[in-house]
Amino acid sequence: MDTKKKILFLTIWIFLGIAIILGVIIVINLFPNILSSVKEASATVINEGDDGPTTIYITAKYNWKMILIISLLLIILDFVFLAIIKIIEHIKVKNIKLIYKVIIIFLVNLLFSILLFPGMFVWSILITAIIIAFIIYKERI
């Protein structure tokens, strides 16, 4: 594949990825109950005894649909940034060092998880580790 076609393909991938990310974030913010309901997300139990103290148990379970969607958004965002790095490499005709790629992906995922979805910090670290392993594996081949 020649350079112009590769840059065009990567540019289309970038715009498609950004459109998907923005579209899903907008839909989730406009319709917060689209993926879960209050009944599905939590439960409250009040335990009263005749002669003892009252205990209240509040539980929550993970909304796996939301975790899956946000994880896929994070992966798409990572590949968008990798496509941007590839375009920069083709335009500059110079390879970007592996450490800079890893730092960029780490910072993007960190900002994404802290600013947008702080409850998914552990999941984003796991996804970051997988993407970084993918980058290192791809660079070594």
Image: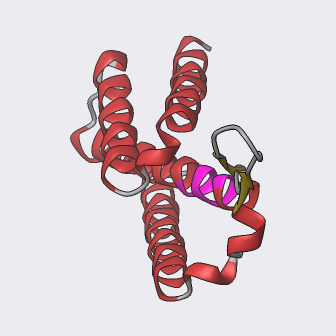
Residue 27 image position (x, y, % from top left): 54, 83
- Nearer the observer, 8 or 69: 69
Let me know if residue 116 is in the magenta part.
no
Residue 84 versus residue 25 in the image, above or below: above
Tag count in the figure? 0
Residue 16 versus residue 63 in the image, above or below: below
Residue farthest along the bottom direction in this orientation: 30
Rendered residue at 64%/46% (across/down) = 54
96 left or right of 140? Answer: left
Magenta stretch, residue numbers = 67-73
The color scheme shown is: secondary structure
Residue farthest along the top direction in this orientation: 140
Residue farthest along the front direction in this orientation: 51
Q: Main secondary structure of the magenta part?
A: helix
Asked which quadrant contains residue 107, the reply is: top left
- Nearer the observer, 117 or 16: 117
89 left or right of 53? Answer: left
Residue 95 image position (x, y, % from top left): 32, 26
Rendered residue at 28%/24% (across/down) = 100
Rendered residue at 44%/75% (across/down) = 22
Residue 17 image position (x, y, % from top left): 51, 65
67 left or right of 20? Answer: right
- Is any part of residue 95 visible from this angle? no
- Is any part of residue 134 visible from this angle? yes
Rendered residue at 76%/45% (across/down) = 49
Q: Quadrant of the C terminus?
A: top right
